[in-house]
Structures are given as C-alpha cells and as structure tokens.
Amino acid sequence: MRIVFMGTPDFAVPTLDRLHADGHAIAAVYTRAPAKAGRGMALKPSPVHARAEALGIPVLTPATLKTPEAAEEFAGHGADVAVVVAYGMLLPQTILDLPRFGCLNLHGSLLPRWRGAAPIQRAVMAGDGESGVGVMRMEAGLDTGPVAMEARVSVPEGMTAGELHDRLMPLGADLMGRAIQALERDGLTFAPQSAEGVVYAHKITNEEARIDWSRPAAEVARHINGLSPFPGAYFEADLGKGLGKGGDKGPERVKVLRALPTDDSGTPGTLLDAACTVACGTGAVRLLELRRAGRGGTASGEEFLRGARLEVGASFA
C-alpha cells in the first residue's frame, strides 16, 4: 500500500515503525512543525518527525491543510490511504477525500466514549475499568467515523495515564498494521458508532490540574493518576524556600504523579502521617510519587516529607 502517515507525539511512532517494517511505501510523513523546547528554547522536532527522518521518509510540516496548495501537494503523493495517529490538526474534507481508501485514524479509546483530544487521561480520571484503541475511517466530525477494529485492555486502580499510554502504543501499532493488511485484501469492514454513550475528552487545561482536596479520595486519586506524567496534578505548600509572586517567599508548587485512596480521615488538605497521607472530603489519599518545582527527579512520599521538613498537621492548598 502507498501510505501518507500523519502523526506527532511518541504515541504515533510505533505505528509508523510497524507500517514501515511491513514494507508499505510511505510516501510522506505529515507532522506538527518543530517547537521551541528546553532552557535554550531551541527548535525541537516532534518524535514522529525525528523517526521519519531516521527512516529516510520525506517530512512535511504545513501550518494548515485548508488551502488549495496544501490539497494539491497532498494529492501529489498518490496515496492509497492516509494513516492518522494523534496528528494534532483537523483534516478538511478536501484532504479526507483524496486517498483511494480514505483516511484511517488510530484513536486511544473505545469509541464513542472519549472522542476528542485527551482520551487516555480522561479514561483514567473517570475511573474507567477498561480502555483500548480503535481504527476508524475519518469523517469531518470529531472522531465520529465508523469503526473497523478495536483492542481492549483493563485499567486497574492506581494505573497512571502514562502507564495506560505505554500499554496502548504497541497495541495500537499492531491493530493498525492488521487493519492495513485487511484493507489490502479488501477485508476491512466498518460499523457505525453507537449514538449512545458519547463522551468528549476535552483538552486538559492548566486550571484543572490543581488538586481539590475537598473531593472524595477516590476522585482525587484518579485525578492525580490521570494527569501523570503530564501536565501533573499539583498542590501548593509553604516549604520555607518557595517563591511567591514578585519573588517573595511563599507557597511552593509540588506535582503529585501517583496516589492511592485510603480510609483515613481528617480536615481536607491536612497531612495526616509520615507516609504522606493527605485528608480529602471523604477518606484520604497516600501520595506515592512527587516532584518539587524546579527539580528534575521524583521522590516517594516519605522522601518528600523529609526533604521538605514537613510535619503531621501541615496544610496543603
């Protein structure tokens, strides 16, 4: 098959590798343009961009696909199918109509649940016991197209979004590889999504990353695990060295990357013990992995408390 591949983050790299290893002719890779990153703010190519260059595949980073010029360039690839994995840009109908077999999207949820930008994080935050990946044919609507294949995984309590992401990456690559093989044999069939159970996975905002200790412990733990490792749920506390607004001493931001609910109780936001258990609206959560602002490494709850010199009864906001 002659394929145009469209993707950006590391989640998409195994699928690109699988299609390349299967011997398909990947005419071009479309990805988001390099972005400034790091302290030097140097331009850094996306993971897909870097991998495509290593494989010797031409890379394109258009700012838009909505112009006649973009459509003409896309048509010039003569693709049988476009494979889209977390590309990060909506495809106009003019692009969707160009490949002979249309555009196939690998989506990180069991559709129609969690259509949209952050399906993996939202599944963990909601406490879904099951998640998965699916291959669908793209339409103009947001993740509304018919689904051809799915693969499912369980989501145990305490799993982070990062861990679920890492389980779904190879699963999705294998699924898309098998879907393209079926397409070659004219054996890929699609079924419309159900009109019931539609839930949107809205983009994660910085504002919702702050931990609300007044919520029940199970919700707080899922919120923390669902935002790990990125952007990272956080609280603020006076650790004696933090900088507030204007450079004055003040509360320091601390990210929490893993937590589990417990049956302890107390005033919400209060540190209950030396194991870094913090009271919630009902119950409490044990903070298992934390990272202080401006520090690269992570620490266990006990290590964090020792380093921060916090005692039982301290307040987290």
Image (tube, rainbow, N blue to C red):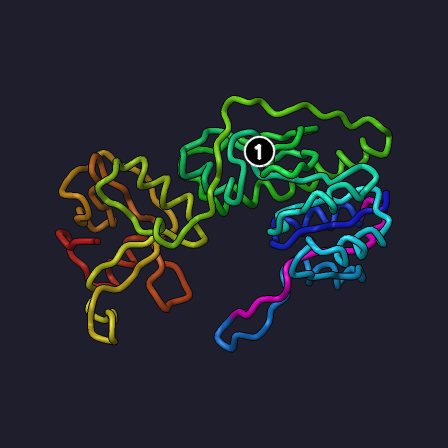
- Please state the horizontal and vertical placement of residue 128, each as a whole percent of the image: 45, 31
**Residue drawn at point x = 45 percent, y = 53 percent:** 230
Task: Mark 1: give few (<14), some (14-19) or many (20+) Cα within 10 Å.
Answer: many
In the foreground, 138 or 7: 138
Q: Quadrant of residue 31?
A: bottom right
- Please state the horizontal and vertical placement of residue 243, each as a whole percent of the image: 25, 71
Residue type, label 1: Gly
Q: Is residue 221 above or below residue 236?
A: above
SS at mark 1 in the image: strand
Q: Quadrant of residue 96?
A: top right
Q: Is residue 36 magenta?
A: yes
**Mark 1, residue position:** 132
Residue segment shown in magenta:
21-37
Picture quarter with the N terminus: top right
- Please state the horizontal and vertical placement of residue 11, each as a whole percent of the image: 61, 49
Q: Is residue 240 left or right of residue 301?
A: left
- Please state the horizontal and vertical placement of residue 315, each as a whole percent of the image: 16, 53
